[in-house]
Amino acid sequence: MELTYNKAHEKLSKLVDLIEDDAIQLDTLAEKVKQAKVLIDFCEAKLRTIDDEVKSALLDKKPSVKKKK
């Protein structure tokens, strides 16, 4: 199963909730923070890619302006 932005964001939200609620044992805190960092990096990369694709699509859709002679 491929990780999607929505799945990564959902997992990240759950990790953040656990960390903020002190629901994680100290023994596993470092591992959970590492997992969160991986998910953050994934989401940021996905958002950058989407942003680039949207900008590219918008540039392709602009009508070309021809100067009259």
Image: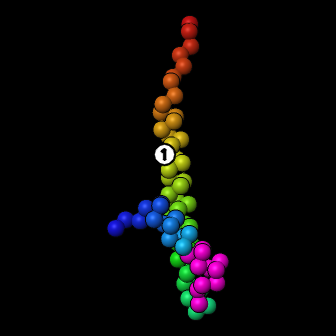
Image vertical order of residue 53 relative to residue 25, above or below: above
Task: Say which residue appears at 50% left-offset and 52% top-offset.
Answer: 49
Amino acid identity at mark 1: Glu
The residue lying furthest to the left in this view is 1
Task: Say which residue appears at 50% left-offset and 71% top-offset.
Answer: 11
Residue 51, position in %: x, y? 54, 48
Quadrant in which residue 12 is drawn = bottom right
Q: Could you say whether the residue bearing mark 1 is in a helix, strand or loop?
A: helix
Residue 33, position in %: x, y? 59, 79
> How many marks can you see?
1
Task: Say which residue appears at 56% left-offset and 88% top-offset.
Answer: 28
The residue lying furthest to the bottom in this view is 27
Say if the magenta span includes residue 1: no
Image vertical order of residue 48 relative to residue 54, above or below: below
Front-most of residues 6 and 54: 6
Residue 17, position in %: x, y? 60, 75
Q: Mark 1 — residue?
A: 53
The colour scheme applied to this rendered structure is rainbow
Q: Which segment did they paint magenta?
A: 15-25
Which quarter of the rendered picture does the N terminus lie within?
A: bottom left
Which quarter of the rendered picture does the C terminus lie within?
A: top right
Quadrant in which residue 40 is drawn = bottom right
Q: Is residue 20 left or right of residue 34?
A: right
Task: Say which residue appears at 54% left-offset and 73% top-offset.
Answer: 14
Label 1 neighbour load within 10 Å: few <14, some 14-19, many 20+? few
Residue 27, position in %: x, y? 58, 92
